[in-house]
Image (cartoon, rainbow, N blue to C red):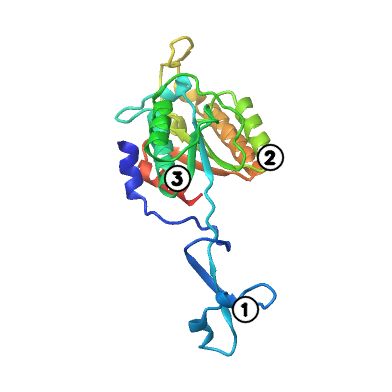
Amino acid sequence: LHAKSLARQVIMGEHGRRDTGAGEEFWQYRPYETYLDGMNAIDWRRSAKSDDLFVRQYEHKVSQTLMIWVDHADRMQSVPARDQSKSYHAAVVAMATTILADHMGEKIGHLSEPDKLGRGESALARIASRLSDQGDAVLHPSVPKSVTLLVSDFLGDMNEITNFVAQASDAGQYGVLLQVTEPREHAFPFKGRTVFQDISGRQTHKAEVAQDIRQAYLARFAERRDQLVDIARRAQWGLVDHVTSDPMLGCLQKLHVY
């Protein structure tokens, strides 16, 4: 419901492919070419305004496939004060993006089920079910001729992500990386004696003066960000940021541009 509410707020429009083809949206006029066009292709109303003959061109509309993947690692369940978890933000934005793609006639699917592509409410319900499942999100190879959306904080092991993006790029696939983080991860606001514990409770680190490790932490955080930028740049993929303290609508609008 949250995803549908977000999707309704985004102005719907056709893909800006700006290519000629058998679509319905008028694109431009071009001069008539005797070796290419039949007489029935001439737009006589436009041609009557000049000494030349013109043909109407239409924008090419070919449906694509959007494949999504959302990281369900334990660290994604971290919940800042007065906010939802990174996992929740990731799932809602990914679902809203899928709803928009379906609205525009694209096929949709989840990368853990590459053989289950579709359109309409049944496909949306299947993807919503996958996003609600907090188990391991399997990252299968990319689907040919598809656009991929990978959503994570990208703060864990990057080997799988790096290999996936490289292989998809080599196969000519395009995608977008959406990094979802929380304010504390950017600011490191901790001071004094602080106990840091992972979400599972298995790892603990005690800092007597937390501010003393702030610069080292921020340097590591920036290093990971640079690594992500490099992965996207090499693959010529898009990269979008979202902080859980910011409205999800802004993030969705950025993704909609891609």
Helix, strand or loop at mark 1: loop
Q: Quadrant of residue 11?
A: bottom left
User: Could you tell me residue 250's position as x and y percent?
Assistant: 39, 46
> Depth check: 115 or 132 in front?
115
Q: Nearer the viewer, residue 232 or 99?
A: 99
Residue 36 at least partly seen: yes
Name the residue nearer the viewer: 219 or 164. 164
> Distance of mark 1 from mark 2, alpha carbons?
38 Å
Q: Residues within 10 Å of mark 3 (few under 14, many from 20)?
A: many
Residue with the mark numbered 1: 32
Place of residue 242 in the rendered image (x, y in percent of width and height, measured from the top left): 44, 39
Q: What residue appears at the point 53 percent right and 63 percent down from the top-left corner?
A: 59
Instruction: Determine if residue 152 is in view.
Output: no
Report the amino acid beneath label 2: Ala
User: In what element is the residue under mark 3?
Assistant: helix
Percent x, y of residue 204: 47, 11
